[in-house]
Amino acid sequence: MRGSRKSLVLFSCLVCFAGSCLTAASQPTTGSPRVGLALSGGGARGAAHIGVLKVLERERIPIHFIAGTSFGALVGGFYALGYRAEEIEEIFSSQDWDHLFSDTPERQLSPILQRKNLRYLGELGLRNFNIELPAAISGGQRLIEVLNYYTTQGMLAADYDFNHLKIPFRAVATDLLTGQPYIFDRGRMSEAMRASIALPAVFTPVEKGDTLLVDGGLANDLPTNIVRDMGADIVIAVDVTSPLLKKESIRTFIDVMDQALSLRMKQTVEANLKFADLVLTPELKGFTPADYTEVLAISAQGEAAAMALKDDLHKLVRNVSRAESSKSPVPPVKPVIESITFDNLTHVEASRLSSEVRARADQPVNVKVLREDLSRLYATGLFDQVDYHLEEVKSNRYRLHYIMKESLAHTIGASIRFDRDYKFVALGEFNARGLFGTPSVGTLSTQFGGLERHSAGLRLVHPRLSFLFLEPEVHFQKLERLDLREGDLVDRFTDRRRGLQLMLGATLFKRMELQAGYRLDRAIIVGGTSPQREENSRRLSGLRARASRDTLDSQDFPRTGMLLNFQIDKVSENLGADFSYSLWQADLQRFFSLSERSAIRVYAGGALSQGALPFFERVYLGGFSFSEIGSKQFLGYSRDEFAPSQFGIAGAGYRRRLFSRPLSLLRRGYVYVDYNIAGISNNQQRPYDFKLYNGVGAGLLLDSLIGPVRLVGGWGESGRFNFYLSIGPAF
């Protein structure tokens, strides 16, 4: 018995001795106190952490441990990886934060058919034909792509261990199932950062094993205790959390939700202040958590706060060795891809995705290529989220896992627009993809209000010839036209159509479509005054050919790219029509970026007809509507003011950004000026005798959460003036 006790005592002594040796080995300098840095959350106000780090670098204040929450995890994680404060400031200030927080795929990478979905103000998935509400506004796809780009190489060199970084680091998230803090100490840095900033209702939770992780501020918004647990003897805390709202400032349900979250976060901050030896609280009055465009100004406030306490900082670390950390910056590595897999696929065939991926086996890992691969895979519209993970299978050789989260195959998209010409117009569409086990899609579309169009269509695609398609469609349309003569309203008539078409087409390089086929419409004209009057229903049948090319970088406010639409209709009595005529139409827009803030647009278009073109088949011109079936735009004139047999139009516009406020109701504002000129002819045979009309417009364009808002004044010939108001996307 006594021998057993002696053995136990001896074993305990050996363990303690070994432990003390390991502890000593992990210290930068034996016997020197170690300094930890705790960085709080606070949204964009967290950019003040960067300014604090700039002072700590400049004053050679050593940091041996870092823990961060939310935005503090972003800044702290970058610093722990070896980025200097100025580099972090450059990375953060150069981001397009509206773009970063958006889940909209890169438009130029999306299949041309998929781009119609970008006009929706909202889209919901259907699971077993039951509507499934999203878990948050954003899935954070673009944020994942950026974080992977900047952190992957460093984490590979550290073997995905946060203790092996230049500075040991911890990121704090909250377990949504238990409410307890979740501490990241290894794994992918991008995942840790994404989880730590997953503010409920703004970003979707991060799935990690059996847990769901959200913003760390809900459990520990100032992780001073975690830095202590890492081994820090001295803790410097930076608190950039927002102050609580006063009673008079709490007016809306958003204010109430913000205050409820802030109360919880404030409690965690106050509970952890006792673990800090020095607390820096930058003066951030006037800056909100959404001021992501103010990174430089907020960083400067952090720098000022640290400089104000410079003497206190030096006193605090007077007994700390100023020697550089024993850990050198993360060395560059050239890991090689061993193999590539697509994980979590259920309904999508991996063979459909191979063409979207540029990474190759036996090639070095290239983070730029991987970032572009994620963008292309996400732009297919088949996934809610796309990520990647590199798993080491041999020495310096990795299996590349693309981690896919498939989106629901059935969705409902909706949009609404108001303008002074057609008043309120609503759009609702049901989309089903993956029909018949192929890439085929079906769409039921209804548009109602000031304009009506209802259709059902299929795009049938062979799985082995995915660039070819057969597209049958049936439709009904009702449109009121104005009969204006010399600028005066004479009468109105209603054009009702029901018909069908069958098109054979090809998609080229995602940016171009060619189609040709047969169309059949029955037109019924109600009302009107001669010669714009038709007593009987008329049959319009014939051949149709289309070509479209779309390389625009944005749906509503492009800066680069072009949009081309070309259509030929050949209607003939020989094909069962009541008329014989041909109508050629073309529209071209080209955008050029002059700077980050400004762009110009040049455009041209026109229509040419031959034969007995009926008045209701003419191209109506005038106004500033963003309807695809309404009157074509001609600034300075009224809707439907011209109904020519032949016309040509050209113009140029300039747009300059006035402000940018990410995550706000009005995200961007632009000043806009435009000039257009048109040649109009009502003659169906030569000589056409075109008459020229000029028009100019100027106004304000707003990018808002409810879609684009356009307030434009237009001036035309003979003293014409029109004020145009449009709210909502084009459709």
Image (cartoon, rainbow, N blue to C red):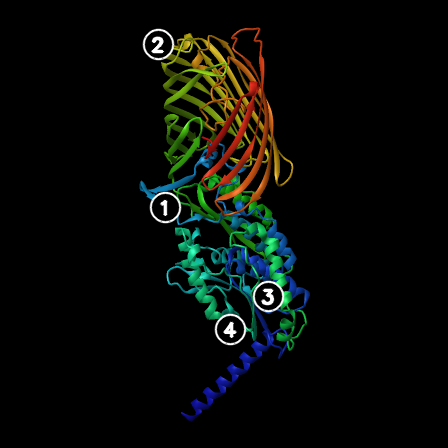
Q: Are marks 2 and 1 in contact (CB under 8 Å)?
A: no
Q: Which mark is residue 133?
A: 1
Q: Which mark is residue 167?
A: 3
- Percent position of residue 566, x then y: 52, 21
In the rendered picture of this protein, how many numbered marks are placed on residues?
Answer: 4
Cα distance in 3D space between marks 4 and 1: 41 Å
Q: Are marks 3 and 2 in contact (CB under 8 Å)?
A: no
* Element type where label 3 sits in the image: loop
Nearer to us: label 4 or label 1: 4
Cα distance in 3D space between marks 1 and 3: 41 Å
Residue flagged by tag 1: what amino acid is it? Leu
Q: In the rendered image, which quarter is residue 728 located in?
A: top left
- Few, some or many C-alpha atoms within 10 Å of disc 1 (few <14, some 14-19, many ≥20)? few
Residue flagged by tag 2: what amino acid is it? Glu
Q: Is residue 504 left or right of residue 410?
A: right
Q: Which residue is mark 4?
A: 275
Q: Residue at 54% across / 32% down in the picture?
A: 509
Residue flagged by tag 4: what amino acid is it? Phe
- Residue 39 versus residue 475: which sits nearer the camera? 39
Q: Residue at 31% across / 42% down in the picture?
A: 128
* Element type where label 2 sits in the image: loop
